[in-house]
Image (cartoon, rainbow, N blue to C red):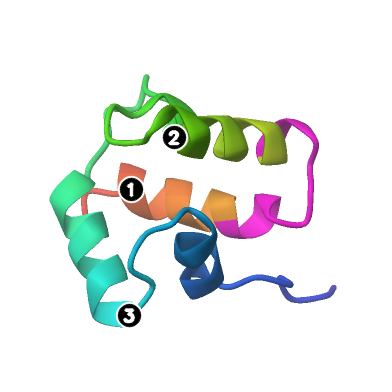
Amino acid sequence: MESSIHSLNNLFAQLGLPSEQAAIEHFIQTHSPLATNILLSDAPFWTSAQASFLREEILNDADWAEVIDQLNAKLHSKN
């Protein structure tokens, strides 16, 4: 099985967010855990463009889907 083409750092850069490891960890700490009934793309902290990107990439099972799933898991985790 191939590893993901994109990393969390790439995803955060794509979303227009700081993409350094410390910034990603801070974002996850700040915004988790998401309630289990909230889809990642429906979380209130995304802009409409960010939410659309996340939703479309998952629906299309695009090359970003795997790393978006990783972020989804991290944000829904209780750490």
Q: Position of residue 71 (x, y in %)?
A: 45, 54
Over which residues does the magenta segment extend? 58-67
Reading the chain from its start, which is encountered first: label 1 or label 2?
Answer: 2
Task: Establish if 35 lies above or below 15.
Answer: above
Give, as a three-letter code, the residue at label 1.
Leu
Q: Quadrant of residue 55?
A: top right
Task: Establish if 58 lies above or below 2.
Answer: above
Q: Which residue is mark 2?
A: 40
Give, as a three-letter code, the residue at label 3.
Gln
Q: Residue furthest bottom?
A: 21
> What is the C-alpha distance between the residues marked 1 and 3?
15 Å
Q: Residue furthest left?
A: 30
> What is the C-alpha distance between the residues marked 3 and 2?
20 Å
In the rendered view of the protein, which quadrant contains the C terminus? bottom left
Q: Nearer the viewer, residue 58 or 52?
A: 52
Q: Is residue 47 left or right of residue 63?
A: left
Q: Secondary structure at mark 1?
A: helix
Do labels 3 and 2 touch, CB within 8 Å? no
Residue ID at (36%, 60%): 17
Residue ID at (33%, 42%): 76
Task: Establish if 55 lies above or below 70.
Answer: above
Give, as a three-letter code, the residue at label 2.
Leu
Q: Specify few, some or many for label 1: CA neighbours under 10 Å numbering under 14, 14-19, or 20 or more.
A: many
Q: Secondary structure at mark 2?
A: helix
Do labels 1 and 2 touch, CB within 8 Å? yes
Q: Which residue is mark 1?
A: 75
Reading the chain from its start, which is encountered first: label 3 or label 2?
Answer: 3
Q: Which residue is mark 3?
A: 21
Q: Is residue 18 left or right of residue 4?
A: left
Task: Establish if 47 lies above or below 42.
Answer: below
